[in-house]
Image (cartoon, grey):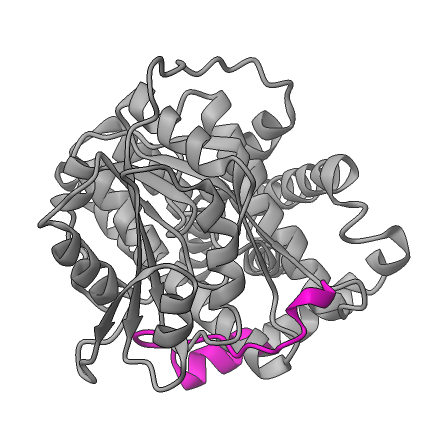
Amino acid sequence: MLCTLSLSAAYLASAALAVPTLVYCVQCVAGLLPDRAVHPRYSGPRPTVAIIVPAHNEEVVIAQTLASVRPQLRPGDRLLVVSDNCTDRTAALAAEGGAEVLERTDPVRRGKGYALDAGMRFLAASPRDHVMIIDADCELDEGAIDHLVSMAAATGEPVQGRNLMKAPCDAPLETRVAEFAYLIKNMVRPVGMSRLGLPSPLMGTGMVLPWHIMNKADLAHGHITEDIKFSIDVTQEGHSPVFCPAYGIVSYFPRSSGGTFSQRQRWEGGHLKMVGTALMHFLKPSSIKTWPAFFLLLDRMVPPITLLFMMLAGLTLLTALLAFAGAGSGPLAVSLSSLMFFLGTTFLVWVARGTQILPISLVGAVPLFILQRAGGYWKFATTGLGRGWIRTERTKERDSF
């Protein structure tokens, strides 16, 4: 009886992990294929846009961010910085940088969602055709506003620009691995979704939305990964966000270990919460209203890649022990196949896109890093996944990246 129950549980666990692994592999392989997508072009003058920059104590980086935005504005555009619960010079520097400034103070209702909601209500008296969201620590590609806004106007859908993070040349292994994982999550997989004709996840920054879509969005909340929640909400309303790999924004990993941990705590903690949310939707299929939402929920089912590898490796070991004990080799075949597909796909992505980020000389140290990350996930489990607006620690060394 115990053997039968163990075998059933192993089959269930292997099948459950095979689903996000398959999604990950299909996205990555599609993301490496030649791009044949043709997006509609917008003819006529570029529509107006209101750019919202939510900021919480960002005096170190806000001026550089605005300097990348201001030259791209056209007559009729608006640039608004929402200084949310700031105790530094963010508001003053934003005003000096040519932005409208909305100062918001509310120690209870804290978070980027509340800042965006305040910004939208401020702009509502004189709205623009589109809204663009840029985080305060991002630099905008030259020509990105014209291209992304025109693309949104041509498609009538939200558009997500390329959103990458860079590490300094002397970054430690963990930051380089994080940059490679970020490349997969925010570039390779969204490109794959686009080439399969599927919606792009919205990433919270570098995205443009028609005003009427953004204006009815549920923004006033403190969800720690508001971008993931927003993606699901938008697709549930029948919209299918489009990904633009050619233009977007770039930001930089913090140098301090404390900043790196707080950033990862927010990202991965929120990501895991949304995996649970996606599971709840699939357990209640009637809650999924549209096909774009269905495919985006599948995308949200994929855990952070280091965690996915640890789960696959651990399950393969457990199913191997069960097979050795005579319980059956079926679960081992499923889990081992999933692990091999995951490793093979990740290797292909590394060869095609990641060797400059993660040189071959460092690859041998990756297993040790993964063991260290296992301890990090334990720390997440014991300290909590994070709440509200968790600001990443900044330094003044940004220009050395």
Q: Residue 73: x and y, percent?
A: 40, 42
Determine if residue 199 is in view: no
Q: Quadrant of residue 120?
A: bottom left
Magenta segment boundaries in residue numbering: 376-401
Q: Position of residue 214 (x, y in %)?
A: 20, 43
Residue at 62% across, 77% down: 396
Q: Which one is nearer the viewer's eye here, 109 or 290?
A: 109
Q: Nearer the viewer, residue 238 or 308?
A: 238
Direction from residue 107 to residue 152 in the image, left or right: right
Res 165 → quadrant: bottom right
Can the viewer see residue 54?
yes
Classify residue 50 by image quadrant.
top left
Quadrant of image for the N terminus:
bottom left
How far across and how far down the image is residue 271, in percent? 41, 59
Magenta stretch: includes residue 265 = no
| Residue farthest toward the left in the current orientation of the protein | 125
Indicate whether 351 appears above or below 111. above
Image coordinates for residue 248, horizontal then vertical, percent: 51, 41
Towards the viewer: 238 or 398 = 398
* Residue lying at 23% horizontally and 30% vertically, measured from the top left: 239
